Amino acid sequence: MIKVVAHNFVRDGCLSEFLAVVKTLVEETNSLDPGCLSYAMYQDLSDPLRVTCIEEWASEETMNSHLKSAHFRKSVEDLLPYCAKPTEASLYKKLF
Amino acid sequence: MIKVVAHNFVRDGCLSEFLAVVKTLVEETNSLDPGCLSYAMYQDLSDPLRVTCIEEWASEETMNSHLKSAHFRKSVEDLLPYCAKPTEASLYKKLF
């Protein structure tokens, strides 16, 4: 199992456009991608322009096929104009 | 619901001592603290000395009573000598 925490930094004034794209991404990922155990978007209570995706994948392989999927690649393209800087993602293994 | 991502930075050479304390903390929190939806420890795949707690609480109130609990306060004390720098925690609300 792989856990991912991916911080997205939204450009000021672009939050609603950003959220519209990631809402679809969350729906598609949960319904289309094999090995997706959970995939949800969260908003930082101290910074509403920081939108963090917390994900859980059955394996690194299933996560990688998600990253190569058409719907993910399209979202990345659509989101680019709404991002202040690149996403910062960390991968984790569960300890206990 | 409140989601918490708390990054801990372990001092080099203190990982096993650190993990022994947080293992107990995870067990006690999951079994003792009302409103604890999930509370688990993860190790960063790119930095084994970065141990991240990802938590889910029914409300900010239940999270705060956890932070005031005897077992949590004791863990913080026990962990101090094994930490390279203070924990960095962010609180989130779920979007979708």
Image: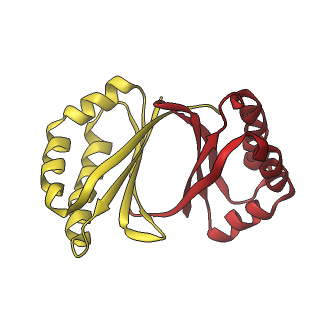
Chain colours: A red, B yellow
> Viewer-proximal residue, A77 or A25?
A77
Quarter of the image with the N terminus of chain A is: bottom right
- Asked whether, in this view, residue A66 is left or right of residue B93, the answer is right
- Asked whether, in this view, residue B78 is left or right of residue A35, the answer is left
Can you give x and y, in whole percent of width and height, for residue A10 in the image? 65, 38
Q: Quadrant of residue A58?
A: bottom right
> Viewer-proximal residue, B41 or B12?
B12
Does residue A80 appear anywhere in the picture?
Answer: yes
Can you give x and y, in whole percent of width and height, for residue B2 in the image? 45, 32
Quarter of the image with the C terminus of chain A is: bottom left
Can you give x and y, in whole percent of width and height, for residue B91 in the image? 43, 36
Residue at image location 80% in from the left, 48% down from the top: A75
- Asked whether, in this view, residue B89 is left or right of residue A53, the answer is left
Report the label total: 0
Does residue A96 appear anywhere in the picture?
Answer: no
Residue at image location 67% in from the left, 36% down from the top: A11
Can you give x and y, in whole percent of width and height, for residue B72 in the image? 20, 43
Q: Quadrant of residue B9?
A: bottom left
Q: Quadrant of residue A43?
A: top right
Question: Is A16 rendered above or below residue A18?
Answer: above
Farthest bottom residue?
A: B13
Residue at image location 72% in from the left, 42% down from the top: A26
